[in-house]
């Protein structure tokens, strides 16, 4: 492994990284996308099916990565696909993560500007978080892993608070009938929910950074399994409290649910503000993971320290963040990234695994 031996993470840290990498934009926009596509209360079924497909893809990713101990996909892709094509795939994956960083940065900026700092220019907000992210990224994977360990439990707790205290507003009639129009609408809903599970593909890189890579399968499947019920409950609560038709029209449905929450004793008068802060922290860690994955990839491709590419990618990330002209354009970038994830997990990874098997490259038990 080219990375410093200190840049290794435990199985529990990897589990949290996998989960945290997926908990991001989907929390506040997934109910809208699902409702618009499905048009019935059955969107939660689409989420469950998408989660199961993500687990299947995660299984394939780990099987491929375990064939090449201590190597990331940036390194072994050239062994499998040949130097030219392999390097092209590695650069493509690095650019995916850099563009994903810019998308996450812009998304953070939009939500912070709307709910927390409406008087602050979005450009200033993004520059601040880009600087903070860079400070963490240059330190390597260890500080990122520790940050994830610290904040993932808090994010889950606040999500559960959102769900529990929304139960009083639930109208069961809003989520009935189940499969009233059959499976066709449900299958349509798989497409918009795919990107919400994006992030687990980071195991193409992080399996090589694990102290115990033999535990990679448990960590990725467990990490995805943790997110499936969280996303499912968020969609159910949004539809059950707001109705499908209303959710379709809301930009951030989950924030609307949070605005209706009243904690006992007036502990917090505006729960959505507190929820927004925790969500921003959640997005920040996802942003840093993507920034690190992109800069590490470029560093390994061109045999340089990842720190140099972390700094070099800053203007690119900022330009990507500023490229969308409005919020609809931001969502369009998200759709593009969702299709890219589908290509990576459903086409690129299986092809590399089959080629490695046929050519007997790497460990045969992978």
Image (spheres, rainbow, N blue to C red):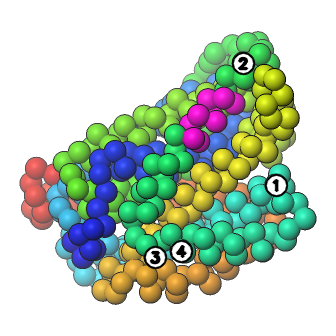
Give coordinates of residue 184: x percent, y percent: 60, 29
Pointer 1: what residue?
116
- How packed is label 4: few (under 14 Cα within 10 Å), some, or many (20 or more)? some
User: Which of the pair 281/198 is nearer the observer?
Assistant: 281
Q: Which mark is residue 200?
A: none
Report, in whole angstroms, how far the alpha carbon at label 3 lies from the one at label 1.
28 Å
Q: Residue 13 location, x and y as percent?
A: 37, 49
Q: Which residue is mark 3?
A: 138
Q: Which mark is residue 135?
A: 4
Question: Mark 2: which secondary structure?
Answer: helix
Q: Are marks 4 and 2 in contact (CB under 8 Å)?
A: no
Q: Position of residue 54 (x, y in %)?
A: 43, 42
Q: CA distance from mark 4 to mark 2?
A: 40 Å
User: Against 130, is 248 above or below?
Assistant: above
Crowd rating for badge 3 (residues with CA inside 10 Å; few <14, some 14–19, many 20+)? many
Measured Cα–Cα span from mark 1 to mark 4: 23 Å
Left or right for 154, reference 144? right
Image-quadrant location for residue 80: bottom left
Q: Which residues are magenta?
A: 154-162
Q: Which residue is mark 2?
A: 167
Mark 1: few/some/many CA within 10 Å (<14, 14-19, 20+): some
Separation of marks 3 and 2 at Cα, in angstroms: 43 Å
| In the rendered image, the vertical position of residue 105 relative to residue 145, given as above or below | below
């Amino acid at each position: 492994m080219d990375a410093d031996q200190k840049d290794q993470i435990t199985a529990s840290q990897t589990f949290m990284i996998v989960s945290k990498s997926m908990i991001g934009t989907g929390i506040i926009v997934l109910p809208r996308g699902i409702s618009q596509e499905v048009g019935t209360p059955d969107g939660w079924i689409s989420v469950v099916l998408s989660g199961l497909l993500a687990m299947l893809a995660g299984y394939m990713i780990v099987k491929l990565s375990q064939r090449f101990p201590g190597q990331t996909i940036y390194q072994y892709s050239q062994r499998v696909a040949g130097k030219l094509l392999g390097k092209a795939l590695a650069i493509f994956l690095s650019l995916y993560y850099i563009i994903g960083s810019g998308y996450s940065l812009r998304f953070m900026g939009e939500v912070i500007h709307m709910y927390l700092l409406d008087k602050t220019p979005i450009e200033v907000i993004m520059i601040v978080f880009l600087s903070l992210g860079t400070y963490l990224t240059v330190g390597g994977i260890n500080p990122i892993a520790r940050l994830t360990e610290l904040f993932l439990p808090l994010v889950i707790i606040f999500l559960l608070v959102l769900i529990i205290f929304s139960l009083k507003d639930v109208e069961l009639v809003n989520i009935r009938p189940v499969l009233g129009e059959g499976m066709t609408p449900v299958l349509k809903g798989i497409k918009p929910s795919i990107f919400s599970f994006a992030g687990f593909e980071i195991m193409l890189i992080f399996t090589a950074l694990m102290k115990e890579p033999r535990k990679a399968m448990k960590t990725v499947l467990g990490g995805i399994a943790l997110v499936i019920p969280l996303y499912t409950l968020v969609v159910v609560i949004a539809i059950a409290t707001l109705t499908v038709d209303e959710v379709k029209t809301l930009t951030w449905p989950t924030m609307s649910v949070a605005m209706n929450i009243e904690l006992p004793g007036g502990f917090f008068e505006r729960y959505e503000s507190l929820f927004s802060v925790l969500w921003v922290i959640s997005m920040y860690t996802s942003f840093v993971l993507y920034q690190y994955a992109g800069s590490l990839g470029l560093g390994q491709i061109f045999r340089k320290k990842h720190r140099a590419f972390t700094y070099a990618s800053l203007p690119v990330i900022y330009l990507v963040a500023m490229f969308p002209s409005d919020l609809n354009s931001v969502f369009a970038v998200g759709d593009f990234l969702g299709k890219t994830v589908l290509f990576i997990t459903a086409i690129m990874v299986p092809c590399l695994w089959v080629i490695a098997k046929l050519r007997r490259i790497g460990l045969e038990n992978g």
